[in-house]
Amino acid sequence: MMDILDGETKVFYATLPMGLERVSAREIEGFGGRIRELREGKGRVFFEGRMDLVPILNNLSRTLERVMLLLCNTHVSSLDDVYRVVKSLDFSFINPDQSFAIRSSRTGTHDFTSIDISREAGQGVIDSYLKDRKIRLKVDLDDPDIIIRVDLIQDELFVGIDTTGDRALHKRWYRVYNHPAPLNPSIACSMIYLSGWKKEKTLLDPMCGSGTIPIESAMMIRNIPPGKNRDFSYFEFLGRILPEFRESGDSSIILGSDKFRKHVEGAKENAKEAGVLDTVRFFQMDVEELKGIEAEYIVTNPPYGLRIGRKGRIKELYEILFERSMDVLTGDSILTLITPYGDLIRDLSIAFGFQIKEEMKVRYGDLDTTIFKLKA
Ligand SMILES: C[S@@+](CC[C@H](N)C(=O)[O-])C[C@H]1O[C@@H](n2cnc3c(N)ncnc32)[C@H](O)[C@@H]1O
């Protein structure tokens, strides 16, 4: 019988925003995982480690979205193959009184849907368990004890135990104010890591919206786990306890500003919920008016003019951002931003004398964006 808690090294894979695999791999290594493979641009990292890594990553990772214990990675050519592959796997680690659910996804062209995948894979699990333990496992789609994730990408099948549960890791608890175009916190954290910001330096987000970048920066220096307040009852089945952590009273100068009062007030509400309102100074200001402020790091997510604002004004606004950044940034300083307008950023970097230190393509929802790290 398979024992997933036997202390042996296991293979896991994590999902994350597509394009940020190298940043997440560094984070996983920092927690003691050994990287096996990066699927660059595909939002997947494979790594090895013991089961102790599971609670650590689910509680402390700032850049991952999900962590799966890999059961199988293979190629299939039909729905029947999906059933056969799943049925051949060993699910005997599930207790007979536990329920399970399949969560599936599908990318590519197929003559079946993800609902078909869930149905066939579910039958495969039931038949495998019947064969091994002569018991029919219960399915509970709403509140399962165990989630088995089955992803089909073109003809590549991934089957794993989802150790994260239904609420992905980038869904932070503190979002009480919803901005119309909020940044995914996993991307925000990757941008902060990429920028190279250190807590003794001042960080400014001059277009902070609901405050994701300043709040996540503050949580980093205060050592507040992004998984704080998560409901971990889902992975009680793993029999693992949460890692100990100590929040720190460390401080830093973190600034967040936005043109609109309602976003600034919303950012404050979010920061309060996150427990970092005393660590970030939020204020209302048009980026055009940014004066009398000094920072070594600007990390920001300017508008794209797609969901909010007018596209025609974007070039002008980005020019203003670069111009004001020249005044704000002091010493050895860095401007890090995410945008779909790569050519514009390259032109502005030349025009304003910024050196491009890094470009990282990130698929953000249905948009192709790039994170730029620029040295002033
Ligand atoms: C993409 S949103 C930022 C979202 C934010 N990262 C979050 O997670 O909520 C861009 C923000 O830029 C702000 N903005 C637009 N024009 C501005 C200007 N001229 N000065 C300052 N902020 C501006 C908008 O109000 C909006 O909140």
Image (tube, grey):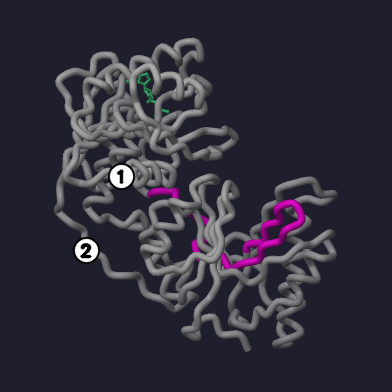
Mark 1, secondary structure of its residue: loop
Q: Amino acid at mark 2?
A: Arg
Q: Does the rendering let one see residue 294?
A: yes
Provide the residue span drawn in magenta: 149-172
Left or right: residue 298 versus residue 185 is left
Q: Amino acid at mark 1?
A: Gly
* Residue bearing mark 1: 196
Mark 2, secondary structure of its residue: loop
Which residue sits at x=38%, y=41%? 191
Judged by depth in the image, the label closer to the viewer, 2 or 1, is: 1
Expressed as whole percent of the image width and height from the top left, the position of residue 67 reads 51, 62
Expressed as whole percent of the image width and height from the top left, the position of residue 250 reads 15, 51
C-alpha gap between disc 2 and disc 1: 23 Å
Mark on residue 246? 2
Mark on residue 301? none
Expressed as whole percent of the image width and height from the top left, the position of residue 226 reads 35, 54
Q: Does the rendering let one see residue 169?
A: no
The quadrant where ligand 1 appears is top left
Q: Is residue 95 above or below residue 371?
A: below
